[in-house]
Amino acid sequence: MSIASEQMTLDEFLARYEHDPILEYAQGVVTEKMSPGWDHAAVQMTVGAAINAYARPRRLAFAFSELRVTGR
């Protein structure tokens, strides 16, 4: 379900919805996030664990689950 009826920029989205965790922005369209299920969580944890097992000891990366970052 689209929340905004017209295209918007990322800056407009962040100004209006930055603190609303149930909405997401993709290619100018704001939609309500789908609730993740068991499969999503299992894949997320498996991939994150594999990345951390390889990359953390080498100080290359650190995988987070459901982390939201906006660069400014």
Image: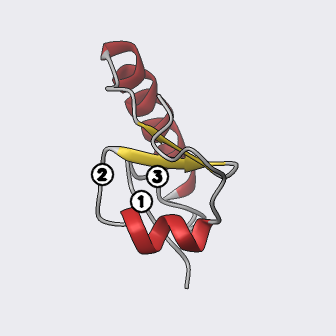
Q: Three-letter amino acid code at disc 2?
A: Pro
Q: Residue at the right extreme?
A: 27
- Tell whether 40 sits left or right of 37: right
> Which of disc 3 and disc 1 is earlier in sequence?
3
Q: Residue at the top extreme?
A: 39
Q: Residue at x 66, y 53 (%)?
A: 7
Q: Looking at the picture, does residue 37 appear above or below residue 46?
A: above
- Tell whether 10 sits left or right of 15: right
Q: Three-letter amino acid code at disc 1?
A: Arg
Q: Residues within 10 Å of mark 3 (few under 14, many from 20)?
A: some
SS at badge 3: loop
Q: CA distance from mark 1 to mark 2?
A: 9 Å
Q: Residues within 10 Å of mark 1 (few under 14, many from 20)?
A: few
Q: Nearer the viewer, mark 2 or mark 3?
A: 2
The residue singled out by tag 1 in the image is 68
Q: Nearer the viewer, mark 1 or mark 2?
A: 2
Out of 6 and 40, give the one closest to the viewer.
Answer: 6
Q: Are marks 1 and 3 in contact (CB under 8 Å)?
A: no
Out of 22 and 51, give the one closest to the viewer.
Answer: 22
Can you say which quadrant of the picture contains the C terminus?
bottom right
Q: CA distance from mark 1 to mark 3?
A: 12 Å
Give the total of numbered labels.
3
Q: Are marks 1 and 2 in contact (CB under 8 Å)?
A: yes
Q: Looking at the picture, does residue 46 appear above or below residue 49?
A: above
